Structure formats: structure tokens, C-alpha cells
Image (spheres, helix red, strand yellow):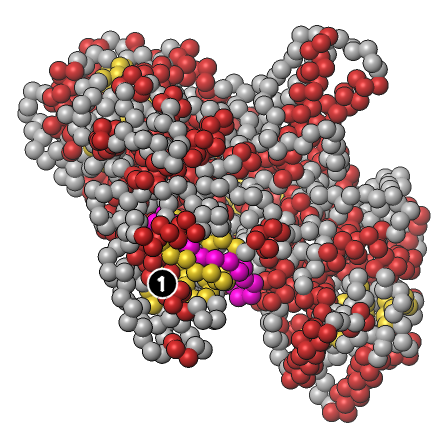
Amino acid sequence: MLPGSRTSFKIQPHGLAPVPKGPKSSDKRNRNSQAFPCIPGELVLEEAARVRKIVRSRGGEGSVLGTLYCTNLRVSFVPEPALSDTVGAPRHPTCPHNEHDVVLPCIRRLVAVNSFTKAKMLTASSTLKFIPEELVLYCRDFRVLRFRFHESGLEPRAFQVTMAIAQAQQSSGGRPGTWPYSTAIRNLENVWLRTEEASLLSSFPTLLFEGLCDWEKELRRLGAAGWRVSSVNERFDMATSLPKYLWVPSRLLDNELKRAFAHFNARRIPRLCWHHPGGSNLLRAAGFHVDSDPEKEDVRCVEALMLAGHTQCVVVETAADLPGPADIQLSYLKLWTLCLPDSSVAVADEKWLSALEGTRWLDHVRACLRKASEVATLLEEKTCSVVLQESDDRDLNCLLASLVQILSDPHTRTQAGFQSLLQKEWVVAGHPFLQRLNLLRDNDREESPVFLLFLDCVWQLLQQFPTSFEYTEAYLVALHDSSYIPFFSTFLFNCQWERDRRNQHRASNQIYASVNGWREPPPLEILQKGSCLAKEGRVPYLPTIWDWALRYTAPERAQFRNPAYTRGSNTGNAILNGNCAPPGEDKPEATLARNGAMYLFAKGALLLQTHLFPWKNGSLSKKGWRQAPSSESLSEQEWSLRSKPSSCLLQPDGLLCPVSLGPLIRLWRRCYLRGSSEVQRGLFAPTLAELANELDLLRERLGDGQAMGSPRVTRHGSREPQPGAPEGKRSPLSPSR
Amino acid sequence: MFVRIVQSSEGSMLLSATVKTENWQFKYKEPEFKNKLIGENDITLHCVDHIYGVYDEKKKSLFGQLKKYPEKLIIYCKDLRVFTFCLRYTKEEEVKRIVSGIIHHSQTPKLLKRLFLFSYATAAPTNTDTQNQTVMFDAIKDWRDELERTKGNMKYKVVSVNEAYKVSEKLPLYFVVPMSLSEENILQYQGRGIPIWCWSCHNGASLLKMSAFPKEQEDSTSQMQKNFLDGVYRTINKPPYEVVKTDDLSNSLPSLQEIQTAYVRFKQLFLIDNSTDFWDSDVKWFSLLESTNWLEIVRRCLKKAIEVADYLEGQNTNVLLVEENASDLCCVVSSLVQVMMDSYYRTKLGFQSLIQKEWVIGGHCFLDRCNHLKQNDKEEAPVFLLFLDCVWQLVQQYPPAFEFTETYLTVLSDSLYIPIFSTFFFNSQHQKDTNMSGESHHAQSSHFRFLTVWDWSVQFEPKAQVLLNNPLYAEKPKLDKSQRKTTRCKHQRQLSLPLTQTKSSPKRGFFREETDHFIKNILGKRISKLINSSDELHNFTEFYDSWHCKPVDFHGLLLPHVEGPGIKVWAQRYLRWIPEAQLLGGGTVVTATKILDMMEEVQSLQKKMEEKHSQTVSQGREVLPVLRNSARLSSLFPFALLQRHSLKPVLPTSTWKDLEDEEDLAKRDDEFVDLGDVI
């Protein structure tokens, strides 16, 4: 179309990666300070006016006129005010998650299109030889943003902005050791604190498990009597990837404990994850180290760790039925391509389902759910210790351990409990988020969305048990999206040691003065609410993602709460607080010494192990135990699902039994298909939320009325009125019966 | 003495029960649950799909006279239940009687007059007149009202030429045709080639259907028919009727045969008599599903309906659906279009009236398509189920737009096989009328009345009926009733229209800048109409896309999503009997009951508020209504009972489990012997 488009422009890319302090960008920033809502510290690198954002990809029609910005943080599109007025709602000023913005690490692919040449995928090093007419951003969060440049003499602008995006996107990672967003983040935080201070305090108390008292508090909640918190790894000198504090059997002294470390890969010893009120324990551990010698004296200590006071120990080989990180990555990429709302790669409608099957993503989800429910059943049925063993204990063990807890423990189905769970089993336990999410793009080969697979599993549970969870699909989507936003300590480090080291480092050499006149160092008590970090005196200056108020407005956060949530009538909480004495606890210690029985659990079958400890990972012949379970191992089995028919009537309250049948494992449409023409609808019809609000309102008013005359009756806790709750009389809800 | 094996996730459990064959159903003890007519363990004879016998672990289909009687009897039902009966502990004499009885009564062809329907109607106590608000369309007034409601009465008229079925036995007594059509025309070819009115859009465009002429060999006949058709077209192409778009459904939609094959294959996925099959199929689930082609057929029907809606609403064009008898896919498409375009049909009464209008009175051959008489397997095709499945897609995509729930649809689909309702047991109004009058000669005529399925109280207690209503239905705001209801709907619906609609109303006049576009549009339409009147161009995407860009108005036009992920399996209907698919304390039903609970509480609180306001003196201590602790439900709730199944998850493959089962069986054997002695 353009006359000049055939001459290849030899404009060199800016030579170096864009320097934020460049005079050009800074003065641009000043110029645009009204137009573009920059976060302090955010710099506009390039901009192009009169860009059309294509609103719908399928129909092709419909576009919004506006200005496209590329900053050192994100690519942002600001529609012309005339249009945005009708759209209405003033956006949260600093939310990088609105529909027109995309944070740089979230861009997976960047393609420039010109009508004459083929579409070209851009990286920082590529030179663009034509004027792009259209720029397509394929985002990791399943969106596709298309920008069409206006055809009126602004070609160089289009060119520059495209290149700027390409380079900024690349430079957001690539340089290990330096932190590209440091200034931006620091200031972001200030802004957030300023604007959202009040609501920050009202968010859910999450145990961060960074300090000792979180561990102790949680142990008390579980009522695990035979366990204690060990601070043997407080300085990370036992194992760098482990958390500082570990739950270990009380009778094991730290000295004995220390001898166990060498027997496990990366020195990740078995430690408690969860204690079932019935007495079983869930443990996780890495595989046995190659050099571990069964003849050594300290094997006893390993044994004690694994048996954990029980006579039976079931070792669950985590990797046996579950996909590996590489499989997960592969199928996730396939899924991503399938779900992209891009008509060029769209699959025919009638072939869609088999294409979905071809990604194998749902198979992986199914495998995880099935395995988790098997383990949860084991915990429920037997009194034993269940050890999840994965060779490095940092990927699928995180997933499995947390899924099992969600199935078994109603507390983890509350928002606070869920967040604590994620802290405990993922963040502190050393899931290598940095590698797996690859936010900095240093190493593509390690990328694997294990965490997103986990979120999908939780979503499956959520849709199978819609009233058992305090949080909603919207919350999970928010969590999913947050994993691409590079501000949060939660997802930026591979383990707690790194996280702490970074923070120490920052704290020491950046006692920064207020930037732009914002407040002095962020108040500790706000940043560390719920944790006991204050006395350690470290400043976690990167916020955790649990401060939802930083990014989500109150109405958005109101959507995180499930209006249909019903706490179980006889909640497991009472039991979990240790009211019921676990039967396994009072067994004489002598029994566990040598007559412990050891089972291996994989592919849905239990098998008695003749050798107790340690066998090496993979040294078992996989065929042998699966196909021909020896007869004595069968007779050994007194474990029967039907043995206690009465107990099963009590049990379902706490335990969720998900179904992993083909038709019931569904696609998380609201997350993966959000870019397509699907109308974004809430999980619940608005009327359900309205109903809940009205109920609250009525209860409250009635309560107020009665408070004068009679003792106030509050049944379901006086929830604070919803922010969106309409005031005054409203009774449009005429139930249609 | 008869033993039933109940499938459960723990393996097999034995239940003892006595079975006797009745004329229409065989029944166990244990009358449970809410359907007042059929218990959970009852199978109406019309619901029996296939019967298998197990001989030495081999499964054989049973029919005709048996030489040897099986050890186990497996019955597949049309509502997808699977029953397994163990006959090993039953006396041989009884086995013979029961098995041959079941086979005889359910599998052999029979006469219409021998339907249980007739015995029931004569024997059943006369029902005190139930208030039936569903419009039945068997009276001329119903049609007039409908014309009035849709504002079709300017151009269309009700004719009564078919009184006493002079014209055709396939046509109803009364139907609606274009005003200008003469009576001779209607009489000429027994109603073939006559456009029959289905529904009028608020903008005046109408949906018509027509039964085509059969393919004739003789040139002269076909020439005459062609001339006749041309005449008819000329009549209806003149003002006040606008352009008519003709759509021959036999070209654009799958044949009945294809539908039947697809359904049979689809059904097979859910008819499971041992759970291991099910475990194995998980990995291939989606491709299995896809290979049945059923969802694709659903999609094609929905697409066709969208296309028709585009013509009616978007382009202001009349649409004439043509099919051989205008009673199969015509019914599917026309009623789908009406559900999508007219919010009245999304209420329960409206939906029932629609089924009366298009299906029951409209002449869908229920008797043949459901193969109730087992006379001709070739005629069998689940057309009505296909329609219900399409509606279900809409219901699950836009739940607040419908007054009824998916449970309603499921229950309705089950009612297809309950032979006490006349609704789904005749091929046409004529057939029903003649059979009724024939009977009344020698019986007391006044007492001879058929029940309709729409009287839900016959099947369900009021408490159970609550589950059929959608508590979250976004009811239309009620205005004062003096105002014309229709004008109101019209206004609302127009609001929700896509932009394209405004261009194409020629009466309204247009602005200058629109002119070019408009002319192009019109010309294009004309030309394309000329070029491909037969060849279907699916050019509704623009209409479809622009509609989906806008927020949904639940009282306006509704277009379903038809993309790959949009069409789903009607899980409630197809999975409800599979214990492995049961979620304890889960599934959509949990939300639904939660909503009902909340609704109830809101109501009671509201009432309390009012009371309080009315009497200024506070009543003092009054306890808030205690939230009733509803029983823990499972996802299969309305259909399968909780206590029947295992409450535990199962570790799928463990050898030791089998051993234990054996043991258990042995134990139970003893019990049965004892019982048998007692009885």
C-alpha cells in the first residue's frame, strides 16, 4: 500500500539496549506525563499516535484509535478519550493488567506484518526491513493484541515503536544479575502503598513461612503432636534450596537430623507437609542420593524420618504417573497455540476437540488429580506416613503435596489457607519459579509451567465442587496472570535462599531516599503483615503477590470471594485443632525401630518393599513390581477400602473426591479462551452475588433492629457489607417460582 | 426371587427385589425418589433400548424365542441407564417367564391400540380438571392469539379447511397461511407446496415452512408442480410480503439416517456396564466424542438457526424452510429460531407452547421417530432429542435467559418414554383424534382423556418441581399490564440488535451517508440470491460476530456460541447414571441448591422485615431462620440416589480388591439363601 514500503529502511536499532536515562526518553516522558499514566520510575521509550487497536480478531472489524506506548515496563495502549469516555470506569491507575496493557515479560511473540512481505517475528537482534503496517503481540496470558498503524505519514514512528518494543521485551531479561525494573518497582510500591494503604490492611492473613512463628503457628493448627520445628537450616547451610525451618519428628535431635541430609539429592530430606487429624502424615522428600550407602549407621536416622513414628510408610513415587516438566511445557505450548484467538492458526470447529486432546494438557491435569486423590485416600484410610518422593523434590512434589492438602484439608480452601499453602509448598519450599516461568528469559530450556498446571487442577476442583471453595475462578485467573508480572518476590526467585539474599543485598546498599517525594521506607508492619519477620530486621522490598490490593480494585477483589461458599457444617477445623487425639501418636516408640513396613505406591497399586532403605531411584525394575505383585505382598494387605463403612459417612466433609473421568475434566475456558470472542462472564450469574449481598444486607438490618430489643443474633458472622452493595431498599429479586 | 446387581464404584452389590411384569413397566420394591410414576428402578417398556444376556461371561443380544436362558440380564435403557440383573439364584421357571416376558413386551412390534396409553386412559381415574396454561394449539383461538401476539395477523390468516382432515392427515386441524393464498391452492396438493406460517419477527419478517413435493418421475407432473410453486411464490413475493429466502433443509442439514447413526454411536460412550471401559477411554475421550459426530450435528443445527435468524432479524427477509414433510428438521430449526429470537419461548409455558405448536400439532412423527411400536427401525431418529440438546447448549450458555433449568430438559427428554402421556405418542393430530374417537364409541366418552406431559404434577411433587425452575431467571421487569406487552418486547429487542439491522429496513428511510452502503448491500443480496438460491453460503459470520461483540440482553435475541469449545456434552443427561462420574458434594446442583436456600432465606427475611415495619413494637426475641443444613448432595443429585453408591474414592487398579470382592459375594450368597427360604 505504502509507496515507500519497498525501500528497505536501514535504520539501525538504537545500537544498545535502550537506556532508560536517555535524554530523549526522559523528555518524552515529561511531555507525556499527562497523557500517559506513568508509574514513577517507568519511562516511555517510544510512542506512536493514531494507532488502531483491532478489537476483535475474528470478525476483523472494529478498532479503537489511540496512542501506543512502549515503556521500560510494559506496552500500553491509551485509547482516545472520546472513546474511553463511553467505556466509562476510570481504571485503576497502576494496574498493569487492564485490557490494553501488557507487561513486557508477558509477550511471548512479537510479529510485524506488512501487506507485501511475510509476517516477521521480531527479536531484539532482528532488523526490520520494512515498515510494519500491523503489529501483533502474542501474550502468554492467551491474549493477542493487534495494532494497526495509521497510513498517514507516521511510518517512521511505527517503525521505531516496533523496534523499541522488540528490544525492550528482550532486554527485560538477558542480563542476569541486574534487575531491570528496580527503580520502577521501588516506586510502584510507593505509589501503591500511598493509594491503597487502607485496603491493604484488610486483605487475608497469609502465613509467609519466612519466620519461625509461622511454622509454629501452622504446626499448632495441624495438631501434629509428635513434630517440632527445626531451625537446623536457618542459615541455609544444610541445604540452600530448602526453607529455613523444617518440620521434623520431635524425637530426632538436630544432630541426628544433620546426618540425614547427605542421603538425599540436593540434601532435601523428608519433612512434614501435612498432618491428617486421623494420624497419618504427609511428607515430601527428594530421591536418595547416588552415594547414599545403606550400610552406614545414619541410615537409621533416615528411616526414622521417613517412618515418622508410624509402623508403615508408603513411598509415593511422584514422577511415576505424572508428566515431567518438559512434557508439561510442550503441551502447554500446544494448548497456548490452540487457544490463541488468532484466525490464522485456528482449528476447524469440528476438529477442535481432538486438537484439544492432542495437546495432552487435560491428560496431565487428569493424571495429577487422580494421583492426588489416591494419595489423599491413602492418608484418609491408613494410619501411616506417606512420603512423596521426587528426584529433586522441587516440581511435581510441590504440585502433588499442595493438591493433596486441598483435597483433604478444608482450611486450604479458604483464601488465607490457600495462600499460606502456596507459600509453604511452593515459594518457600523452593519451586524454581524463576526458571520455570522464565520471566527473565535467561534460559528457555528450563521453562515449564508446573505452577499453571497446578492452578488448572485447582480450577477443576473448583468447578467440580463449586461451594467448597472460598475463592473463585476469578481469583485463580488473577493468580495465573500475576505469574507474568515481574514485580513480586514470589515468582522471581528459585528458592528462599536466593530471595533472602537478594533482599539482604538490596536492604544493605539501597537505603533509598524517597523518590519523587514519596514516603520514606515502606512501613514494615504493612509489608510483613502476618509474618514475624520484623524482628529479623530484613526488608522484603519486593512485595508478595498476596497483596491483592496493590493490583486489584475493591470491586475486582470482591469477585474473589465465592458467594456460594459454604463452610462444612461440622468443619474439619475443630478436628484439625487437635481436639481428637490421633491414634498413631501414642504408639510406643520401640515398635518403629526395625519392624516398620515399607510400601511403594505407584500406578495405583501398593507394593511391599523387601529392602527397607535406601533403594536408589530407578534401581527398581519398573516392570517387576507393576505387573506381578507377589502373593505375599497381597496377603500383607489388610488395607481395605470397605473396612470401616461407618467412618465414610463422616469423612466426606473434609475430603473432596474429585472425578477425573474424561467428560469431567474440562478446559479452563475463562483463562485460556479469554482472547476469543467469548464474552467474559462471571463464574456466577450476577444475581447470585446480588442475592448474597441482599442476604447480608437483610441480616445486618434485621440484626440492627433486634440489637435494640434483644440480644443480637448473628449466625453467619457479620460480614462487612460488600463494597458494591447497593444501599437503600432494593427488592428487584422477585424469585420466579 | 430376583436379584439385581447394582453397579457401584466398589464393584457389584446385590439387592434383592421382586419383579413382576406389568403391562407397561416392571417394578421393584423400593419406591423412592420424586418421580411419582416411575421409581428409580423402573423401566418403562418403551424405555428399553437393548437387552443382553450373559452366558458364560459372553454378552449376547437377546430377542425372539430363547433356547437357553442367561445367567445375567443386562438392560440398556433409552434414558441411558444400564441395569444388570443376576438370574443365577432365581428358579428356572421364573427366569423363563420373566425374560421372555420382558423381551416380548419390549422388543416385539405391537399395535398402536395396544399401547399402555389407552389402557391407562380408560382405567385411570378421571382427573379433575387441572389448570393447564400451556397453549395447546388445538383450537382456532390459540392460533389467532399467537398471530396477534407476534403481530403476524396483518399478513397471515388461520384457515380451517382441514377440519375433518379434508386436506391432509398430516396437517393439523388449523394452521396459518399467507393471507393471499386461496383455499383451492391449499386443497390442490394436499397441503404440499403451501407455505405454512410458524412465527413472525417483530419487524414483520416471518418464518414459514413448507413440505416439498416428492420427486416425480413424470415430467408433466413435475412441470405442473413447478408451475404451482411458481404461482405460490409469486403470491407471497408480492407486497405486503417482502423477499422470501427459501432454504431446503435436506441440502444443508444432515439426514435423519446420519442423525440416528451419530446418536447411536454417541450413546455408546455413556452406556457402560463395567467401569474399566470407562477408565480406559479417558485418554481418547475427546477424539471418541468427535468421531461420533453428534456434537457436530448439534453445531450445524445451531448454525442453521443462526443463519435463519440473520435473515429474519438482520436482513428483514422472510424465510421459508422446505423439507419433505416439514416435520423433522423443520421443527428443529424453526423452534430453535423461535427460542433464540423470542424471549416468550424461553419461559416454561412458552417453551411448552412452542413444542405443542411446532412438534405435537405441527406433525412431528413422535411414534415413528421414537420407534415406540417397534414396527420399523428405519424410521427411528432422535430428532426431538437433537432439538433438546440444541436448547441445552443455549441454556448452559445463557442460564439467566431461561425460566427452566437443564433438569427440566432432562426430565422432558425422559418423558418421551412414559406411555401415560399422549403428547409424544402420536404421529399427528389426526392420528390422535381418530384413535380417541374410535375408542369413545364403546366406552364412556366423557371420561376418556389423555394426560399431557405438561401437567408436571402428575410426575412430580411440588417440591421436586422446584428443581425445574431456574431461580436465577432474569425475569422481564413487569410493567403495568394495561400496556401492550408486545410493544414493550419489541422495543427491548431492538435495543439489543446488532448495528446491521438498522440499515436494512427500507421503510424507515435512510441517511445520505448510508445510501451507498445500503444500495451495495441490497444489490449484493439480490445478486447473491440470484446466483446461489440453492447453494448455501454461510455468510452469517458478520451478523454472528457483531452480535457477540455486544453485551447480552437476556430478553432479546440470543445467539449461541458455536465455535469448537462452545458446544458441550449435555453432562447431566448423559452422565447421570454413571457412578464413576459422581461428585460428592459437588457439581452444579450444589450451587443451585445453595441459591434456592439463599432465596428462601431472603424471602423469609424480607417477610420479617415487613412484619417488623408493620408492627412498630418489636416482637422481642426472634430467632433468625436457621439455614437448613441441606443434605450433602452429589452431582448426580436429582437422578441417582446418594446412599446407593460408594462414598469413597477408589484406587482404580488393585488386584487385592478383586479377591476381597469374591469373598464378599460369598458372604452375601448365604444371606440370599436364607432370604429365599423365608420368602
Residue A158 appears in view? yes
- Please give the range of residues in magenta: A57-74
Q: Nearer the viewer, residue A505 or B431?
A: A505
Q: Is residue A73 magenta?
A: yes
In the rendered image of this protein, does residue A513 appear above or below residue A170? Answer: above
Q: Along the horizontal axis of the image, is B184 left or right of A297?
A: right
Tag 1 secondary structure:
helix
Amino acid type shown at disc 1 = Gln
- For image coordinates 81% across by 66% down, the residue present is B204
Q: Residues within 10 Å of mark 1 (few under 14, many from 20)?
A: many
Image coordinates of residue A182 in percent, x first then y, are 30, 40
Q: Is residue A63 magenta?
A: yes
Q: What quarter of the picture does the C terminus of chain B occupy?
A: top right
Quarter residue A490 falls in: top left
Q: Nearer the viewer, residue A388 or A420?
A: A420
Image coordinates of residue B145 in percent, x first then y, are 89, 57
- For image coordinates 41% across by 14% down, the residue present is A577
- For image coordinates 85% across by 64% down, the residue present is B152
Which residue matches tag 1? A160
Residue B29 appears in view? no
